[in-house]
Image: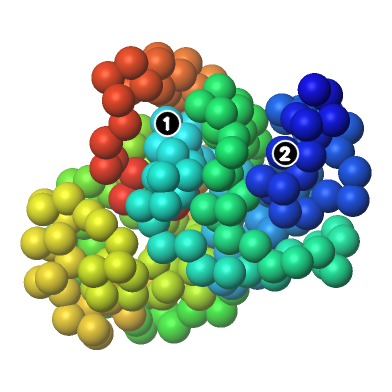
Amino acid sequence: MKSFYLTALSLALGMFASVSAAGDLATVVENCNGCHGDDGVSQWSDVPTIAGVPEYVHADALYFFRDEERPCSEAEYKQGDTSRAATTMCAVVADLSDEMLDEIAAHYFELPFVAAQQEFDAGLAAAGKAVHDEACDKCHSEGGANPDDEAGILSGQWIGYLEATFAEYASGAREQDKKMKDTMDALSDADTTALIHYYASTTLVSSDGQQYRRREFREALRVHRCDGHGELSWFYP
């Protein structure tokens, strides 16, 4: 029986030569870090930083990946054993339990978000701030940096990841609620590019108040899981 569980987890994560124990959070996190970077801080433009993302938002996204309700493009491992076969988010979480997905989200919320250090166009960023303030700030306050919004962290994310995510929304590959779809549909290509550079330019997330936010989001997560998950986490993270 033990051998069966070890084999199942290894296949689900698609990466281990050996697995210490089925359902071991440390082992699963090590796999996550192989793509998302040490402590969930990405060093690669096409991969989002997941450290500091509110656990409610993060867990919700993981549930959608497990249900194959989000685009799951194949990706190579960025560090560690890079000889491992490429995988997808859907494959990584396919056989993980609700409890494990919630544990993963809680683990990364305890870690500090680190804004990506990247080049951006200052003129586009200024234009993007105007677009954000008019169209996006109500749901993505503080420049997309406020975890209490339950809408992920946009501020300080990588340009490549943001470009791919916006493209998924624009093409309809990624589902969104009507309010956000109406907002996205009203944006021009120039607006979208400007927004991305604005988010790339901002580093508003701080550690102040994190303990309060952790407690608040843990309670929200508990209630949310009792009621069933819905399309709330617009951006992952």
Residue beneath the point at 37% across and 21% down: 225
Q: Which label was assigned to residue 8?
A: none
Circle 2 Cα neighbour tier, 10 Å, few/some/many (<14 / 14–19 / ≥20): many
Q: Name the one closer to the observer, 100 or 178.
A: 100
Q: Quadrant of residue 61?
A: top left
Q: Name the one closer to the observer, 11 or 90.
A: 11
Q: Where is residue 212 in the image (x, y as percent from the top left)?
A: 47, 19
Q: Position of residue 153 (x, y in %)?
A: 43, 49
Could you tell whether 229 is left or right of 64 in the image?
Answer: left
Figure label count: 2
- Tell me the mark number nearer the camera, choosing from 1 and 2: 2
Residue beneath the point at 56% across and 79% down: 119
Query: Which residue does the numbered mark 1 point to in the structure image?
Result: 56
Residue beneath the point at 22% across and 46% down: 139
The quadrant of the rendering that contains the N terminus is top right
Residue beneath the point at 10% across and 72% down: 186
Identity, as a three-letter code, of the amino acid under mark 1: Tyr
In this picture the colour scheme is rainbow
Query: Which residue does the numbered mark 2 point to in the structure image?
Result: 9
Circle 1 Cα neighbour tier, 10 Å, few/some/many (<14 / 14–19 / ≥20): many
